[in-house]
Amino acid sequence: MNNALLALAGAIVAVTGTLLAPILSQRVLARVQTEQFERQQRAADAQWIREQRVAEVEKRRACYVTANSGYRRHRIELMKYLWLVHKTEVTASARADLEETRHSMHTAFAEAQMVASDAVLRELDAMTVTLAAAYSRTLLLADGNPQPGWSFEEIQTELLRLGDRWKNMRGIMRADLGVDPGQAGPADS
């Protein structure tokens, strides 16, 4: 009888294994698929975050290019206008060009206020204040009412001094974008 019980127990185990195998393999397969889906979801989330960071950096880069260009153009146009004031050769066209670059600079600054980092905004703010003061003093000089201590030479010196400040601002922008600030070229006059 021992052999019969042993055979019966073996048969029960074999039948039970045969019946449970599909259920167990389906559970293992479901667990593997769930883990694989979660891995894919984590990878997709990480990819989305990377893409968002790249898009954000690209948006800041475009903003910084626009701001740098707008501020630089206004400074150059202001220097040209100051020279025309000095030579008493101011024209309506020169004044219109100056105003156009000033408005472009303000537009670039408005965009930067929405996108730029705090460090870049501090630099742009300081640059805006300096350019606005030079603009105001240049117009007063053109009208024949210069402010005391702000002759042609002093305004010109202030505008030329902005070149060093430009290097600093450009370096901060580059650092904010993850570019080595030391790779910046010389400041434009």
Image (tube, rainbow, N blue to C red):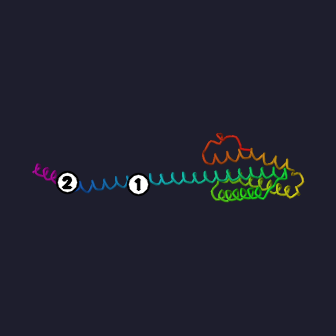
User: Could you tell me residue 125's position as x and y percent?
Assistant: 73, 55
The residue depicted at 14 percent of the width and 50 percent of the height is 6
User: Could you tell me residue 50's position as x and y percent?
Assistant: 51, 51
Distance from disc 1 to disc 2, alpha carbons, whole Å, reads 31 Å
Q: Nearer the viewer, residue 44 or 77?
A: 77
Quick one: label 1 or label 2, which is nearer the N terminus?
2
Q: Is residue 7 magenta?
A: yes
In which quadrant is the C terminus drawn? top right
Label 2, residues with CA under 10 Å away: few <14, some 14-19, many ≥20: few
Magenta segment, which residues?
1-18
The residue depicted at 86 percent of the width and 58 percent of the height is 143
User: Could you tell me residue 120's position as x and y percent?
Assistant: 68, 51
For residue 12, side relative to residue 83 (left or right): left
Q: What residue type is labelled 2?
A: Thr
Secondary-structure class at tag 2: helix
In this rendering, is residue 112 above or below 188? below
Principal secondary structure, stretch drawn in magenta? helix
User: Could you tell me residue 62's position as x and y percent?
Assistant: 61, 52
Which is in the foreground here, disc 1 or disc 2? 1
The residue depicted at 32 percent of the width and 56 percent of the height is 30
Q: What residue type is labelled 1?
A: Glu
Secondary-structure class at tag 1: helix
Q: Mark 2 points at which residue?
A: 18
Q: Is residue 15 magenta?
A: yes
Q: Name the residue under label 1.
A: 38
